[in-house]
Structures are given as C-alpha cells and as structure tokens.
C-alpha cells in the first residue's frame, strides 16, 4: 500500500509543477513527470509476490508469472507519451518565435 | 551552438561514432527480429534504429546523416511500414476475422515461429524508426527568426 | 521490497529537484535521472519489455528537450500574490490526495493481483500463438487493435509536428523557412 502512496506523491509533484510554474519548459517537465507516475502505477498493479517475468524458458519451468496484460498497455502508453512530448516541444518553439519569451504571463499581455 | 550542426563535434566523438553506430543499428535489428522470443519487440527496436541515425547526425552534421537516410526516404519507409502492417492484418480477413494469425505456428523457441508476429514486428519497426527520425529532423533543423511580429 | 522503496524515494527527490531548479538545462537533466530510476524500478518489478522501451524513449525525450532549451534564456520574475497562489495550490493537492486515499482502499493488496483475463493468456498463449514472449503475443495477437491505434497515433504525431513547425500564413515572394547552416 505504501508504494501506491509514493506513486501518488510523484503524481502530485507533477501536478504542482503544471499548476504553479511560469515557464513553458517547466510545464513540459511537469507533464513528463505525470506520465512517469501513471505508467508506474499500472505496472505496480501487475506485480505478483515471488513472480517471474512473463517469458517462457527452455531450461526451466516458469510457473509463477506476473500479469502480462498491463505490460502491453504501458508499452503503448510510453510511446504515446513520447509523441505528446515532441508535439509540446514544437508548440513551445513556436511560442518562443512569436513572443520572444517563455513566460506565460507575458504571453497573455501581448496581442500579436 | 550553431556550429555544432554544421561541422560536427570534436575528433574523439567522431571516432567513437564511427566505431559504434553500426553496432547500434545491428542491435536494434536484433531486438526487432527476436521480438517473439526475448523481451523487446517492434517499438523498442524501432526507437533504437532511429537513435543510431540521430547519433550520426549529432556527431557529423546533417549532410552525413542525410546521405544515409534522406527526408523523402524516411517518409517512404514510414508509409511502407504502415501499409505492410495493414495488409498483414487485412489478409487475416480471408481466414476468418481481422488480425487472424494465419501463418504456420512452428515450434517454440525457433526464429521462424509464431505466425504473423515477427512480420508485424518488422512492419512496426519501420514505422516507428522512420517516424521518430522525421520528428527529430523537423524539430532540430529549422531556424526561426526570433523577432516579435 | 526495500530496494523498490528506496528507488521510489529517490525518484520523488529527483522530481522535486527538477521542479524547483532555476536553470533549465539542470532541471532537464534531473528529469532524465528520474526516468533512469524508473527504468530500474521496472526491472525490479519483473517487466523487462517495459524497462527497455522506457530507457530508450526517455533518452530520446531528453535529446529533444535539450535541443529546444539550449539557446533560450530563462526570464524569471515573480509578480505579487505569491503566497496566496502557493497556499491555494497546496490545499488543492491535499484534497486530491485525501480523495485518492479513499479510492485506494478498493485496490487489491500489492503483490496479489486478480488475474481474471490473464489466466487465459498465460495458460493458452504458447499453444495458440506459438510465441514464447507473452507480452509480444498480447500486443500483436490478442490485442492487436491497440497496436493499430498506436501506429495511427505515431503517424498523426509526425504530421502534427511537421504542421506546427512549418511556416504558416502568407509567404512573401522568395521567402521560405531557413535551415541552419
């Protein structure tokens, strides 16, 4: 149970960064930390005590495997997170080109 | 830092890149081809293949990387991967349902086993590798003039 | 599970450092350290596929982020009402934390998952698909629709990045997007 609480704490650090920070790059860092926390939570629900990795072996009889279904979901989610990060960085570069700054309060004031 | 992309980095970096970039590409192909036997699969292998081209671009400048994989070639590879994946899945329709595993299953632990899974892994690796390389080229090689409008 | 707890505490400390540093390059490197510790945590939880993918994807995200932040400066200014904003944020996060704690009571205990669907995958996976890597057989045979959706998302991301970066609007005669020499 305490591992779930630590994952929730990591998620809360990410949310604090997204809500409070003023620089666009810090917002991107906050979104990345949120994605890490969510992926970690999925893999934590799949763990089995004294479990083995879900791969068959020729020499041993692997009997006690962890749950392979959340592994498949998280594999997809990690690559989608990379696509999201790339798009966010592209938008951040456009913002810097148009306004000359990364500060979101200044972006509100200027009318382009 | 703009001279970094023009002439490349220092001599030590260039020598190490020349020695390792082929090994990285080969390692990526190994992870893709053995995706049904060992951990890995199409996504991790595709990203490693893209990383080898990015390594070449960071160390030598963009001309050397474009000689190996130009922008139009990356677009063709990505579309080829997507079309291959869809064709394999639609061919399953002839047997019964979408994504039916119709090839011979083979024996476990052999390289040619598990039906359509190795072919799907190869198609996914084309798509992911070329797509990630195209994203990197688009983000890194464009210069904006930073004046306010 | 002591290593798991130590690694997670290190991840939280690294995330707090990444959020609070003023220098952009240092905070990006701190996020890289958090991702590396996450990959080791995945290995501890017996998930080798996910660990390989997380490691290489995090390296790629680091490269893209560093390229975007290197030439730009960091204008740092705090306008008024700093204390009120921080107090409101911390109250919101505390309420969210307490509500989530109530929800966590319904989760099965850590280490004893309810594997209703996965029992079928583990028992019949090798005979129905012939692949010994069960996660590979799940993403490419049992749940291949999700992989098709993810291929579509990657395609859309490439088109989206090219559309965002391209110069829009009216072009003057002879003007095009310059490339670095």
Image (cartoon, coloured by chain):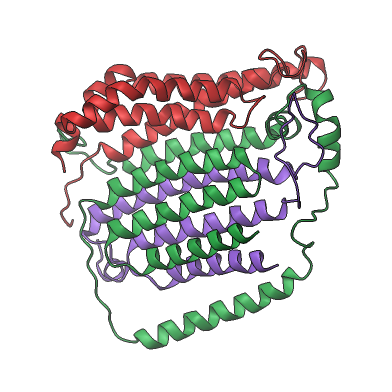
In the picture provided, is A96 more to the left or to the right than A88?
left
> Which one is nearer the viewer's eye here, A79 or C123?
C123
In the displayed structure, B22 sits above or below C82; it is above
The location of residue B114, given as percent across then percent down, is 73, 19
Location of residue C111 by image quarter: bottom right
Q: Is residue A56 left or right of residue B19?
A: right
**The C terminus of chain B sits in image quarter:** bottom left
Chain given the colour purple: A
State the image coordinates of residue B141 (x, y, percent, origin top left).
25, 36
Q: Which chain is red?
A: B
- Name the one closer to the observer, A57 or A15: A57
Q: How many marks?
A: 0
Q: Observer-nearest residue: C48 or C31?
A: C48
| Residue displayed at 66% across by 14% down | B111
The image shows residue B64 at horizontal and vertical percentages of 24, 21
Q: From the image, state the color of chain C.
A: green
In the image, taking residue B86 as reference, residue C127 lies left or right, namely: right
Residue, x 58% and y 18% (percent of image)? B84
Q: Is residue B145 above or below residue C155?
A: below
Please determine whether, in this image, residue C31 is positioned above or below residue B64.
below
Where C79 falls versus B148 (above or below)?
Answer: below
The answer to whether C128 appears left or right of C173 in the picture is: right
Q: Quadrant of residue B115?
A: top right
Residue at (85% x, 41% y) in the render: C119
Residue C166 in sight in this render? no
Q: Is residue A76 at least partly visible in the picture?
A: yes
Locate the N terminus of chain B and report the quarter of the image it occupies: top left
- Give how far across and how far down residue C100 sits, in percent: 67, 72
Q: Residue at x 37, y 47 (%)?
A: C62
- Decide which of B96, A82 is in the foreground and name it: A82
């Amino acid at each position: 149970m305490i591992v779930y609480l630590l994952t929730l704490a990591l998620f809360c650090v990410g949310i604090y960064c997204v809500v409070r920070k003023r620089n666009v790059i810090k917002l991107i860092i906050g979104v990345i930390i949120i994605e890490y926390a969510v992926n970690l939570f999925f893999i934590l629900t799949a763990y089995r005590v004294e479990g083995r990795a879900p791969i068959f072996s020729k020499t041993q009889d692997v009997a006690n495997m962890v749950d392979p279904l959340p592994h498949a979901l998280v594999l997809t989610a990690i690559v989608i997170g990379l696509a999201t990060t790339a798009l966010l960085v592209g938008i951040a570069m456009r913002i810097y080109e148009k306004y000359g700054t990364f500060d979101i309060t200044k972006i509100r004031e200027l009318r382009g | 830092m703009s001279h970094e992309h023009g002439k490349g980095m220092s001599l030590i970096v260039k020598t190490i890149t020349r020695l390792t970039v082929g090994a990285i590409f080969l390692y990526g192909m190994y992870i893709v081809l053995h995706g049904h036997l060992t951990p890995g699969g199409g996504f991790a292998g595709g990203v490693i293949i893209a990383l080898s081209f990015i390594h070449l671009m960071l160390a030598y400048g963009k001309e050397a990387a474009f000689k190996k994989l130009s922008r139009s070639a990356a677009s063709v590879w990505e579309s080829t991967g997507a079309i291959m994946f869809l064709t394999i899945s639609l061919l399953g329709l002839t047997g019964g349902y979408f994504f039916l595993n119709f090839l011979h299953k083979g024996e476990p632990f052999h390289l040619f086993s598990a039906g359509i899974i190795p072919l799907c892994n190869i198609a996914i690796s084309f798509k992911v590798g070329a797509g990630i390389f195209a994203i990197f080229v688009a983000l890194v090689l464009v210069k904006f003039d930073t004046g306010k409008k | 599970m002591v290593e798991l707890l130590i690694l997670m505490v290190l991840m939280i400390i690294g995330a707090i450092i990444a959020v609070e540093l003023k220098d952009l390059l240092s905070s990006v490197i701190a996020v890289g350290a958090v991702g590396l510790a996450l990959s080791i945590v995945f290995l501890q939880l017996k998930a080798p596929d996910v660990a390989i993918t997380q490691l290489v994807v995090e390296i790629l995200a680091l490269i893209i982020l560093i390229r975007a932040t290197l030439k730009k400066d960091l204008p740092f200014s705090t306008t008024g009402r700093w204390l009120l904003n921080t107090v409101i944020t911390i109250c919101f996060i505390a309420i969210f934390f307490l509500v989530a704690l109530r929800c966590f009571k319904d989760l099965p205990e850590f280490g004893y998952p309810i594997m209703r669907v996965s029992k079928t995958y583990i028992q019949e996976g090798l005979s129905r698909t012939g692949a010994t890597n069960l996660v590979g057989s799940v993403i490419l045979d049992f749940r291949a629709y999700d992989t098709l959706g993810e291929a579509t998302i990657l395609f859309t991301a490439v088109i989206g990045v090219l559309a965002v970066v391209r110069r829009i609007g009216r072009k003057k005669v002879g003007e095009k997007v310059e490339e670095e020499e």
